[in-house]
Amino acid sequence: MQFLGQQFYVPFLRLWNATKTFYSTFQFTGTANRTHTLQDRDGTLADLGAQTFDGAQRGVFKTLADASTIAVDLSLGNNFRVVLGGNRTLGTPTNGGEGQQGVISPCQDATGSRALAYTWFWTYGGGFVGILSTTAFTFDMLSYTVNYWLLSTFTVTSATPGVFTVVAHGMVSGRQCQLSTTGALYTGLSAATTYFVHVIDANTFHLSTSMVNLRAGTYVATSGSQSGVHTIHCAAGTLSLLKATP
C-alpha cells in the first residue's frame, strides 16, 4: 500500500517486523508541523551527513568499574570516569570504532597517589607517558581519540616471510596490532604480542616485531603447524592529559 501526497490523521503509527513478533510505536504529540523521513533500507535508520544543532549536545559520564585492569566498553558512551582504588592499568577497550573521541576521568580515592599504566592500545602524543595528579580526591581528564580500529579473523601462510590475509583490510603500513587464536599460531607468532603492519596490497600484509624491523624490511617468518581460528586486532588510541588544578 502506498500513500503519495495524501493527508490523513493517525494518533500513532505502529511498525511491525517481518514475522510480527516485535514492533515500534511512533506517538504523535507535537504542537507544530513536522516532516519525518523514513529510510528505504533494512537495518539502519539514518545515514547522516553534516548536522547543525542549535542547542547544546551532552554526553553523560559512564562509570567504569575499578579493577586491576580497568575495562572500557566504548559502545556505552564517549565519556567515562573511574575512582582508582589502587595502582591500575587502563585496559584495551572493546567495541571501539575509528574516529571515536571523548574523555576518561581517573579520580584519586582518599588515599591518593594511585598510578595508572596503559595497555598496548593506548599511547600519548609526543612519546611521553602522562603521570596523574596524586592528591586525594583530585581528578584528571584524559582526552582520547581512536585513531584506527580493525578486529577481524585472518589467514596466514607458512613462509619466510609469512603473508597474512584479511580481505579489504583498510590498513596502512606502520599500524600496530596484536593476535589471538582459538587454537595454535604458527611458530614465529605469539598471541598478546605487539606487531607492526607492512601492507602488501588491499588484502594482504606482513608483520614486523618492531618499528625498526619494519623500516628495515624485516618481517616475521612463520613455520610449523597451526590450528583454530585466528583474530587480528589492529587498533590504537591517542591520549592527552589535563591535570587537576589545586
Image: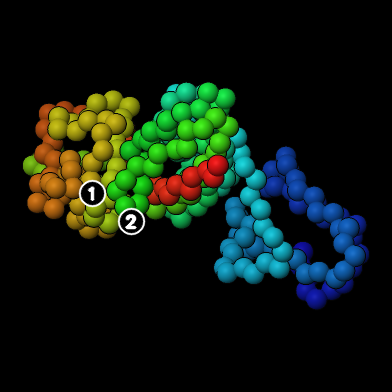
Q: Is residue 90 visible?
A: yes
Q: Quadrant of residue 39?
A: bottom right
Task: Indicate the position of residue 198 as horizontal and vertical percent values.
Answer: 20, 52
Pick the quarter of the image with the N terminus: bottom right
Task: Residue under label 2, please give it.
Answer: 170
Number of the label disc, if any, that sits on residue 13? none
Q: Label 2 to label 1, Cα distance in Å?
A: 11 Å
Q: Is residue 66 visible?
A: no
Residue lying at 88% horizontally and 58% vertically, measured from the top left: 29
Residue lying at 46% horizontally and 55% vertically, measured from the top left: 99
Task: Residue under label 1, please give it.
Answer: 197
Q: Amino acid at mark 2?
A: Gly
Task: Indicate the position of residue 132 as horizontal and vertical percent values.
Answer: 44, 38
Callout 2 secondary element: loop
Residues 201 and 140: in front is 140
Left or right, 189 with reference to 52: left
Q: Using a 10 Å C-alpha cutoff, classify the residue at mark 1 as few (fewer than 14 neighbours), some (14 to 19) or many (20 or more).
A: many
Q: Using a 10 Å C-alpha cutoff, classify the residue at mark 2 as few (fewer than 14 neighbours), some (14 to 19) or many (20 or more).
A: few
Task: Indicate the position of residue 211 as horizontal and vertical percent values.
Answer: 18, 48
In the image, is residue 56 above or below residue 217?
A: below
Q: Amino acid at mark 1?
A: Val
Residue lying at 46% horizontally and 28% vertically, measured from the top left: 114
Left or right, 235 with reference to 29: left
Which circle, 2 or 1, is nearer the viewer? 1
Residues 16 and 193: in front is 193
Residues 146 and 239: in front is 239
Callout 1 secondary element: strand
N-terminal label among 2 and 1? 2
Residue lying at 34% horizontally and 42% vertically, measured from the top left: 129
